[in-house]
Amino acid sequence: MKLGMIKYHLLLLFREPLILVFGLALPFVQLFITQEPLSPEGLPYFDHFMDLVMPLVIAIAVMALCFMDSAFSHAYSRQIKFLRRLRMTPVTPAIYVLTGVLSRLGVVFVFTGTFLVASSVIVDLNLAGRNWFAFISMLTLMFAMFYFMGMFVANVFKSAKQSQSMLYVVFFSFIFLVNVVGNLDTFPDLVRTLIEHFPAFYAVNLLRAAWMGTGLFGGHELIATVLLTVVFGALSVKFFKYE
């Protein structure tokens, strides 16, 4: 049954090729476009710049997969009453959500590995000396948090249309937040404090710390992200709706 649900989730993913292009292919397009400007000869401190940018690009792709594919597809399935059929099967909300995580996690790993290899070939990204265990762990944690958050939004509203609208708001708000990670000094103190306590900010900082090997236990971000993942995981199951 669980393998069947994983297959079902993957079929949903590949039925929406536009999401794949938007969420997963776009970073490759961006890499080719910026190949010349990002050459080591044309940019001082190239390695440091790539270390800052790479986790950000991966985080955006993961958010697109979680919010605009998984969660949006679920809200759409609610809207067309497709999930009614699952009520008559042994598939529980917990099984549905967890198999969704497992199916998309494989996609995330394949995308990330391919993107890193392509980056090492195209712009000479340095892959040596990385703590791959820490990086994969933080990538998995970040994906799980975003996935559970997306599923919570896709289910918490009575109307599937409302859920879809809110997913757009959450996704583009998070895109804005992760893009200002390196420019927080330009914001007023109150705005900067608010941004620093958003889940997307925590996740990107953790992934960047794992990628750069700067330590994961220096602050509260890891604990906060784990707690948010557990909380939203429970909420996505509690508020699960078949229609």
Image (tube, helix red, strand yellow):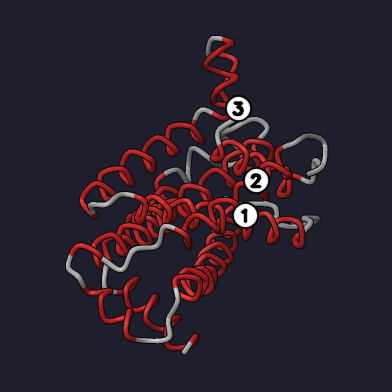
Identity of the residue drawn at 56% across and 12% down: 190
Q: Which mark is residue 92?
A: none
- Residue 80 lies, in percent from the top left, at 17, 67
User: What residue would you read off at disc 3?
Assistant: 196
Comparing 164 with 58, the one in front is 164
88 vs 105, left or right, is left
Q: Residues within 10 Å of mark 3 (few under 14, many from 20)?
A: some
User: What residue would you read off at disc 2?
Assistant: 225
- Residue 227 lies, in percent from the top left, at 66, 48
Quarter placement of the C terminus: bottom left
Q: Residues within 10 Å of mark 1 (few under 14, many from 20)?
A: some
User: What residue would you read off at disc 1?
Assistant: 230
- Residue 202 lies, in percent from the top left, at 62, 38
Comparing 143 with 179, the one in front is 143
Q: CA distance from mark 1 to mark 2?
A: 9 Å
Chain-order first, disc 3 or disc 1: 3
Q: CA distance from mark 3 to mark 2?
A: 13 Å
Asked whether the beta carbons under mark 1 and mark 2 sit within 8 Å of each other, the answer is: no
Amino acid carrying label 1: it is Val
182 vs 236, left or right, is right
Amino acid carrying label 2: it is Thr
